[in-house]
Image: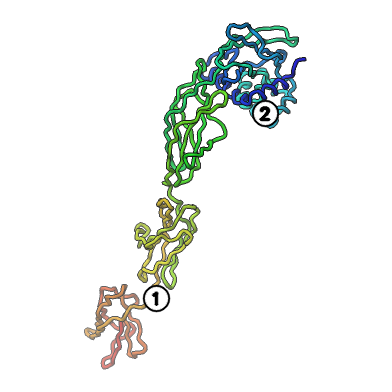
Amino acid sequence: MEKTVEQKNRVQSNRNGNFMKLTHAILLVLMFSLISFAEKLPDLVGFSDGKATYVFLPHAIPGDQGVVLWKKLPGGSWQKALPAVIRPIDDPYRMQKLLGSDYATVARTMKDPDPTRILTKLREDPVYSLMLCFKVPKLSLLLGRLIVDTKVIKGQRVAYRVEFVDKGNNHLRYTSTIYVNIAMPRVREVRKLHVKVADRLATVTFTYPKFDWKKADWVVGFRLYRSDDGINFHRVGSDFIFRLDNPKVTLQDGLLEYGKTYWYKVTTVSYFGYESKGSTPVKVYVADREPPSIVQNVQAKFTGEGILINWDLSPEPDVVGYDVYRGVSAETVKHKLNTALVPAVQTYFLDSTGTEGEKYFYGVIAVDKAGNRSQMSARPYAIWEDNTPPPPPQWVKAVYGHGKLNVSWAPVTKEKVRGYYVYRGMDKEHLLQVTPKPVGKKSLRFADAGNGEKKFQFGKAYWVAV
C-alpha cells in the first residue's frame, strides 16, 4: 500500500532532525542561482552531512504527479532510495492544519488567507514557492520537494536522480543525475573580526569569500554571538544571517549598556544547520560619550537668604549631579557657584554670595557618571534685593552764597551707592526733599536755589541733610 505524503514525511523527520535547517540552506543556493547568477535552476540539488543525503527539487511538482528517489552506489546499479512514491499534498485545508502556526506566515506572505488559492499559487509560481519554502521549511516536505536518504555510508560518492510518475505510477521522466560525497563538509571559519562601537551600537564587520553554488561551498550564513564575560556567549538575533553575494559582511548589535565590556564572535552555518566553533572573540568597551539632556524648567527667585535656583529632575538614569553657574548677563553665565556637584536627587541651589541690588543670570548643567556634560540650560535671572540702607554721607556742609545754599559732602566709598538725595528745612524733624532725582554718585555737591521757597529768609536757620 502506498504511503501518504504525511506518513513519509513523518518517517523522514524522525530519521533526521535537521531537515528544516537543510531546506533553508538549499533554497538559499537556489535563490542565488535565480537572482544573483541569473541562470536556469537545476533539476536537482543534493548535499550530505556524512549521516544522510538531502535531495531538493527546485521546481514545483505538478499536482497530478509524484516522484521517486533513485540512487546508484559506486560499482552498482540504480535502485530506489525510498520504496514509496512521494506526492505533494493536494488538500489545501489539510495543508493549513499541518502547517499549524506557520500558516499565518504563508498567508501573510501571499497576502491571501484562502488555503485553496495559496496552494494553487504554490504550484504555479516558482518564485513564491521557493520563497515560502525558504521561510517555512515544513512547507518543502508538504509539497514533496525535500527527500532524505538516511541509508548512506560515509566516504562514498553516490549518484542520485529523481523519477517523475503519473497518478498510476507510470514513468514520465528522469531528472539529471547529481553526485554527492557522503561526508561532513569542511567549513571555513571567519578569520578576523572588526568591531566598532558608536554610542550604544556595535558594528561587526568581516570578509568572507563570495558564495559559489557550483562548488562544494557549504557555508550559507553566519550567526553573531555576544558575551558579558568572554566565556558564556549568547546569540544575537533569532536566526542566522544569510551569506550574500558580497565578500564584506556587516552585522550590528544595539542597545548596549554604557560602561560595560563585551566580547563578540561569529560562527559559520552550513547547509544542515551545523555551526562552527566560531571566530576568535573580540573584546570591546562601550564608552559613554553621549551627554545628558538639557536641564529643564530652571527658575531663579530672591529669598531672604539669597537667590534660590530650582530645576526639574533630570530623566537620565546615569546623571550623578549638577553644576550651577552665574553671570551678570545671559552671555556671561560662566562662574561656577558650587565647589562639589549638586547631588542628582537635589534640584535646587542657594546662591548666597551675590551683591545687593545686582541682577544675576543663572544656568545649570547636568553631569553623568562618565563625566559627560549637558549643554547649559536656559538662563533665567533674578535681582538681589537691597534691603540694607547705606551709611549716611559724612562731612556735610552748606554755605549760602549768591542766593543759593551750596551743599557738599564726602563720598560713601564702602557701599555700592547710585546717588544721593538732599533734604532741607527750618525744622530739623521735618526736612523736605529738594532733589526730585538722586544726585549722581560722583557729584558730591548740590546748589539749592530755594526750591519750595520764594526766597531764603535772612536771619533764619536752615537744616540740610544728605
Q: Nearer the viewer, residue 58 or 35?
A: 58
> Which residue occupies 60% across, 10% down?
73
Binning the other alpha carbons within 10 Å of mark 2 as few (below 14), some (14 to 19) or many (20 upward) gives: some
Residue 46 image position (x, y, % from top left): 58, 16
The residue under label 2 is which amino acid type?
Ala
277 sits left or right of 98 in the view: left
Q: Give the number of the disc on residue 233.
A: none
**Residue under numbered circle 2:** 107
Pointers 1 and 2 in contact (C-beta within 8 Å): no
Residue 404 visible from this viewpoint = no
Q: Nearer the viewer, residue 51 or 374?
A: 51
Circle nearer the viewer, 1 or 2: 2
Question: What is the residue that sits farthest to the bottom in this orientation?
Answer: 459
Q: Whole-Å distance between the Cαs marked 1 and 2? A: 80 Å
**Residue under numbered circle 1:** 387
> Which residue occupies 24% across, 81% down?
408
Q: Is residue 245 above or below residue 251?
A: above
> Which residue occupies 67% across, 18% down?
144
Residue 403 image position (x, y, % from top left): 24, 84
User: Which quadrant is home to the C terminus?
Assistant: bottom left
Q: Is residue 439 above or below residue 198?
A: below
Binning the other alpha carbons within 10 Å of mark 1 as few (below 14), some (14 to 19) or many (20 upward) gives: few
Q: Is residue 362 above or below residue 456?
A: above
The residue under label 1 is which amino acid type?
Asn
Dividing the picture into quadrants, the one containing residue 119 is top right
287 sits left or right of 166 in the view: left
Q: Nearer the viewer, residue 454 or 274?
A: 274
Mark 1: secondary structure: loop
